[in-house]
Image (cartoon, coloured by chain):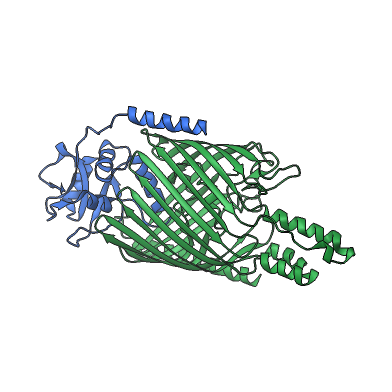
Amino acid sequence: MHRMTLIGFTIVALALSQGTGASEVDVVAVVSSKSTLTTLTKSQVAQIFLGKSDHFPDGSQALPIDQAEGTVARDAFYTKYTGKSAAVVKAYWSKMVFTGRGLPPKAVSNSLEIRKVLAQNPNAIGYIEQNLVDSSLRVIVTQ
Amino acid sequence: MVQANCVNSRLRFGSYAATAVMLCAVSARAADADRSVFSFNGFGTLGVVHSSEDHADFTSSLYKPNGAGFSHNWSPDVDSLIGAQVTANVAPRLSAVLQVIAEQNYDKSYRPHVEWANIKYQFTADCSIRVGRTVLPAFLFSETRKVTYTYPWVRPPIEVYRLLPVTSEDGLDVSYRLHLGELTSTVQANAGRRTTHIVEGGTTEARDTWGVSDSTEYGPLTLQITYVKTHLTVSSLNSFFDVFRQFGPQGIAIADKYNSNAKPLSNIGVGASYDSGNWLVMSEWGHSHTPSFIGNSTAWYVSGGYRFGKFMPSITYSQAKADNLSDPGLNVSAVPPLVVGPATGLNAALNSILSTKPVQNTISAGARWDVLQNVSLKLQLDHTRIGAGSSGVLTNIQPGFQTGGEFTLFSVSIDFVF
């Protein structure tokens, strides 16, 4: 038992010594400016991107668009909106895929591609760095 | 035999139907280039295990013939496997899944077997029905037990995860998800049957299987409650217990008590996990009950880990208890002198079967390192103390093995998904 106690203390000590690694990139959830959607809760955004909901509160279809794995925006988005790291989200989708419950959202390669896809589809929802938002997009206000 | 054929033909029907749906998908969606009809995914584990107990084998499932310890100093068969899956989205509401896994089989081959093969119809985003083969959701990680990338350990705590000897069914299930504010609750009901080959020869046949489960998520918290009921026949052991019947009423009583001829078996699972993003704490409790040689078992574990970026150390304590590890058997003073020898032999064989019920506890320390986006490397050290009169989860018991001992496992594995 001494061995386990030691391991336990080591974990706690390491946990306390580690600062909260807040991401520097500010990522916001966005829809097309043609969409009528203005606000969602963080939880509603998370449910749409984790495949737990396929529609917006007004009943219209929600089409989540991801960014490629390994992009800074993707990591920052999942941390901010779901509280999960990229690896945890990957494990979550592995569970969903290999139990036949669903497939992850379609992903595009970067934030500029997100702008293109969202401009064409009022049902789509994506995320992008705050400073890359242009007039074709509307930032979703999260409560 | 008739039953086995019946089950086989049902599965074949399921597989054919899944294939047919996938073929329909090609023609139906060929023109729709926007979203591909088929998704191909795969997963695998390459692992080796060393055990300090060399008079018996450690294996990861009841259906594996050998493992680490007696058969192999370092065994690749305990955890290594590869799986491939095709998902066909035929129509917005209709999909099919076929998942095939190659791992060490009951006959030592690595011949692939069908793990999942079903067709799903999605009535709404929150309600669906599936027909075909599905894995039973007995515990938190039962359904993805083979997808090792989905959990922090090299393998889920074996004390709990081997409580239910039936892991899948050919039948149907219905799932309904409720949204109550921030809380989502998924209720699933299933019914089916399944025949599985076992190492000792013959099969285990689970008929009239049904179950209900509820999984509720609230932020970082998940709570799961499951119930499974089945009727289990272990054919190879039934012929052994029938020998007791030749000893008159006392032999018949023993045979009826321990045989497994369509005996009802129920399993309850209660599990909770808390995943804050950095902290991961999980605990599960399970109880299985059946009036046969398998008897009643209770097991639980508690596990905690902390993520330092891509590195996650964790510790786990798990424990399994079972009743009735021995039986006086036939009263040899009441049998004719000529058959005292056979009666004594039968009693010894009965007690060796009863001693295979796992009574043990394990302390594990392990670490997971997410090497790449889809690849993790795991190390794990397990120290197990076996209860008096039990051989724990070990199999291939050799002469010289002492019940109630202890052993240490060292496991390393690489897990991947694609």
Q: Whole-percent x and y of residue B345?
A: 80, 57
Q: How many marks?
A: 0
Chain ID for blue: A
Q: Is residue B60 above or below residue B339?
A: above
Is residue B383 found left or right of A67 in the rendered image?
right
Q: Is residue B333 above or below residue A81?
A: below
Furthest-front residue in view? B333
Q: Whole-percent x and y of residue B251?
A: 76, 68
Q: Whole-percent x and y of residue B395?
A: 66, 48
Is residue B111 found left or right of A141 in the rendered image?
right
Q: Whole-percent x and y of residue A36?
A: 12, 56
Furthest-top residue in view? A17
Q: Tell which of B119 and A88 is nearer to you.
A: A88
The residue shown at (45%, 67%) is B190
The residue shown at (20%, 41%) is A128
Q: Tell which of B274 and A31 is nearer to you.
A: B274
Q: Is residue B12 above or below residue B314?
A: below
Task: Please indicate, yes or no, whether residue B30 appears anywhere in the rendered image.
Answer: no
Furthest-left residue in view? A135
Chain ID for green: B
Locate residue A90: give its quadrant: top left
Task: Please indicate, yes or no, whether residue B139 appears anywhere in the rendered image.
Answer: yes
Q: Tell which of A82 and B293 is nearer to you.
A: B293
The residue shown at (29%, 29%) is A19
